Image (cartoon, grey):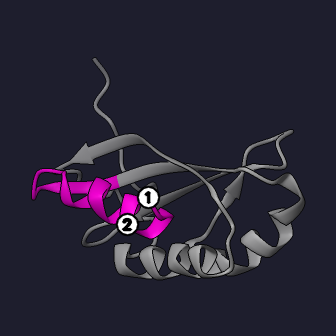
Amino acid sequence: MSLATEFRTAVDDQAPDWSDMLFELRLQEEIRFDEARLSMAPAQLQRKAGERDLFTFRISRVRGYGAHAPLVESCLAKLDAVGIEGELELMRVLHEVEPNWTQGPVLPVT
């Protein structure tokens, strides 16, 4: 399955009240790291410390921190088009989160 299709499926499988999602993208070929990073730049990738084949990125549905889902899907489609393969994993989904000024999602302390 292509990365863009896998991403779209993950987003579509969520309840309609999702606020933010965190994904990891692990490349199959570390040598294509820089090429992938440039193609995915609009998605605001973050590199995992000490890893050259692993990115994280966030998306948001309405507001807050993270890229817009259709933008990320088009970036992943660019990777698919040039044959950059990898594994996409949904790490976290937050529902009905209201941003607290500039902090982004804030989880209640229990």
Q: Is residue 53 magenta?
A: no
Q: Amino acid at mark 1?
A: Met
As rendered, which of 80 and 58 lies closer to the eye? 80
Magenta part of the chain: 1-20
As rendered, which of 5 and 93 lies closer to the eye? 5
* Secondary structure at numbered mark 2: helix
* Secondary structure at numbered mark 1: loop
As rendered, which of 99 and 40 lies closer to the eye? 40
Q: Is residue 93 above or below residue 21?
A: above
**Horizontal side, residue 109 vs residue 78: left or right:** left
Q: Which residue is drawn at the image coordinates 60% and 70% (left, top)? A: 44
Q: Which residue is drawn at the image coordinates 19% and 52% (left, top)? A: 13
Q: Amino acid at mark 2?
A: Thr
Where residue 40 sits in the image (x, y, percent)?
Answer: 64, 74
Mark 2 Cα-neighbour bin, 10 Å: few <14, some 14–19, many ≥20: some
- Which quarter of the rendered picture does the N terminus lie within? bottom left
**Horizontal side, residue 105 vs residue 28: left or right:** left
Pointer 1 with pointer 2, Cβ within 8 A: yes
Q: Is residue 8 magenta?
A: yes
**Horizontal side, residue 72 vs residue 35: left or right:** left
Q: Which residue is drawn at the image coordinates 36% and 72% (left, top)? A: 69
Say which mark, if any, is on residue 5: 2
Which residue is disc 1 drawn over? 1
Of tags 1 and 2, the one toward the viewer is 1
Q: Is residue 4 above or below residue 30?
A: below
Where residue 25 sits in the image (x, y, percent)?
Answer: 60, 52
